[in-house]
Amino acid sequence: MSAVLEVSNLRKSFGGITAVDGVSFEVRDGEILGIIGPNGSGKSTLFNCVLGQLQPTDGEVKVDGKVTNGMRPRDINRLGVSRTFQLLQVFPQLSVRDNLILAGQEHQGTMFTRLIGRSDAGLGPAADQMIEFFRLSHIATEMAGMLSYGQQKLLDAAMAFMAGPRLVLLDEPAGGVNLTMLANLRERLQAYHAERKATFVVIEH
Amino acid sequence: MNRAATISIAFAAAGAVIAPFMLKPFGIFLISMWAVLTIAAIGLNLTLGYAGQVSMAQGAFVGIGAYTLALLTQAGVPYPIAFAASGILCFIIGWGLGYPALRVQHHYLAFVTLAFTTIVFLLLRNEEWLTGGIYGVNAIARPVFFGWSTGKAMDYYFFCLGVLTVIAFAVWWMLRSPWGRAFVALRENPVRALSLGLDTRRYTLMAFAIGSSLGGFAGALFASLVQFIEPASFALNRSFDLLLMVIVGGSGYFMGPFVGALVAVLLPEWMRVTEGYYLIIYAALIMVMMPLAPYGIVGLIERGYKALTVKRKPPAPMLTPERTAP
Amino acid sequence: MASFIQLLVSGLATGAIYALIAVGFTLLWQTSQTINFAQGEFVMLPAFFILIAMNYGAPFWLSCLIGIAVSIVVLGIAFKYIIVDPMLKHGVLPLVISSIALALFLKEAVKDFYSSQAQPFPVLVEASDVHIFGAVISSQSLVVLAVAIATVIGMTFLLNRTRLGRMMQATAQNPTLARILGVPVRRMVLYTFLLNAVLCAIASILISPIYLAKFTNGETLGMAAFLAAIIGGFNQVRGAILGGVILGILDNLSAAYLSSQYRAAFPLIILIIVILVRPQGLLGRVEERTV
């Protein structure tokens, strides 16, 4: 089994503060890697560096053996890497279904075919499947902003899977979610992992 | 909602077709102006309402479009080509104006576009060799298509209405395509959009360019409608007016610009009785409306309709998570 | 050279007035995210308060005091409670629209209820010329400069050296933290509105003898305030002062040495360059955004 993600000697400093100091690890295909640490230990910064939201000060990130330092987040996303955010990041004025379609549409066709093609970019069935899979059917047409926090968290996770990623980085998926919802989320993530053989990196404290 | 919306749009469309037969020439002029301003407002609604990019330059694009059409037709260029050129030129300039939006947002972008508007106004006023300066351009032709002359008020109105219909359909199509979703994503959360693989750069520039090109088409129609253009018509006030139309109608709602432009065109006529006090009353109305219904008239109607028809339990309260340091 | 000094001094005088307007503008932005598109009209209006007081027979100095007091009530208190507060929860853009409407409202109100003609406005000192290094400088420019500088110094003293001023700055920089530290944030926000009204009134007294009091005065003045605030740095009081002075000098120099047709475009081009190259302004700090 080859390494999907390799991080070597990653370092990130903000002025005088070094948030991430020489972190190295690798994640193999189909693995679930947990990263645990207290608040402020640099977990999210690590994610931001891996995904191109921040540029690492030093070190190297490889996805499938390809160096991704300096690539824009959208290009890294195109390599099949997706993520969830620690703070909620859904689009409140789009419906649950539209949020999901949006999460996958940029992987379909070109700008031009997306303009003249079908409204759902051919992702309608996939979105409906995902809605069912994450048990969001009863709220599929609601605006995401009207959902409860736990439901938005589920949607956030579901969005990360829409493009059929090989590697998913989950930033505190359980943070602020009540226990029932958490059990639900955990079960869904495990089911997805079993079904698609995707590779996970999970941050929790 | 959909059924009610379809029925009311059908009625409105029928009204737009019947109206000129019941109006005097000045009335036809007004509804032609409504069609023209609606096109410009649709463009701004795309840039501002959907993609969330504040622009105070729409009036300038109307001006660029108007002058392009006027000068090209007077130089002997066939009308259809001049008309297309108005939109295309604004598309290109709008694309350029989109670049600052990639670097700065909100009030900074508002001021860049505001500065752009003022510079365009100064160019129109000062470059007399091209634009005729403060004397403007007059005797602007109205088009003739295959023997159908749009010289008369009613004919020209139907030409404007036709262009409005085509543009409205194209924009409606675009907004329900993945592009529409991408524009809203740009407005609501560009960082997240980027991490979902959206080319936010290109969508931002597109939102500016397409919105601006609609301003250009509106300007082309405007030039032939009033048949005399001068720089003052495209000063900052025009951009403010268009901004008010979009907000008053309902920014981010497809029907918003139609309603906003209607209010902007009809209100001054209805308030003729108030004589000179029209602008004071207009300004006061907006100040009263903003805190009560910042989502505009269409937003107000939609909310009212929902409140009346859908009996639903109040949305679950949004729990805010403990905000933790990364 | 002599004419250059002349231009420089009159430029400084105009710039100092712009600075007063721009400082109030940035204060409002900092404390309540208000982009006041009516700021120019806020400078246009006090002159008319003063003229009305004088029409009732009050002497000029008393009228000025009345004008400042009325400005505090109308442009400070009423503006905050009637226009700004109800809009805050709706975000920046609706408030921008409201302030554009307010600008229109004030302009039209002056035109319809006072006069559409430019009104002569009393000068602070009799016009006479002062000779410095061979340059002829009007006493007016010097007085404007003196008053504006005194106001800026007074305000800087208030903001930096007094308890009240520090509380206002704390409110401007981080309202949440300031509230936790026991700063009466709501009152401090109100004070910035009052301070803005006073600055606008003083600017009005200084500029109206030069431009005459006219309902359209706000258009150019408001634009100058935005330009100064952005060029100097939107989130810094001293940035706004620097921006105002730069703008005033540029204004006068470009009018003399550049094509007067494009005089108005010159600061706009500088604005665009500043925004593109250094969006935080010359003295501004980068406002941090969280991912």
Image (tube, coloured by chain):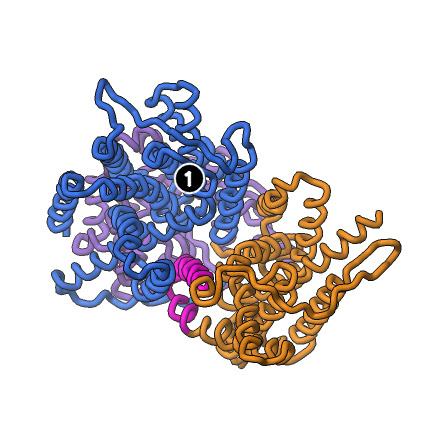
Image position, residue B40 (x, y; %): 34, 41
Towards the viewer: A53 or C236? C236
Please give the letter of the chain rendered in purple.
A
Q: Is residue B93 magenta?
A: no
Disc 1: which chain?
A: B
Say which residue label 1 marks: B208
- Magenta residues? C82-108
Image position, residue A116 (x, y; %): 27, 30
Image position, residue A118 (x, y; %): 23, 33
Q: Is residue B14 above or below residue C234?
A: above
**Magenta span: chief secondary structure:** helix
Residue C31 shows in this picture: yes
Per the rendering, the colour in which chain B appears is blue
Q: Is residue B289 above or below residue B251?
A: below
Name the side, left or right, on which C43 lies relative to B76. Answer: right
Q: Give the residue displayed 27% in from the left and 59% down from the top.
A: A151
Name the side, left or right, on which B310 lies relative to C247. Answer: left
Q: Give the secondary structure at mark 1.
A: helix
- Badge 1 crowding class, 10 Å Cα cut-off, few under 14, some 14 to 19, many 20 or more, is many
Amino acid beneath label 1: Phe
Please give the letter of the chain rendered in orange.
C
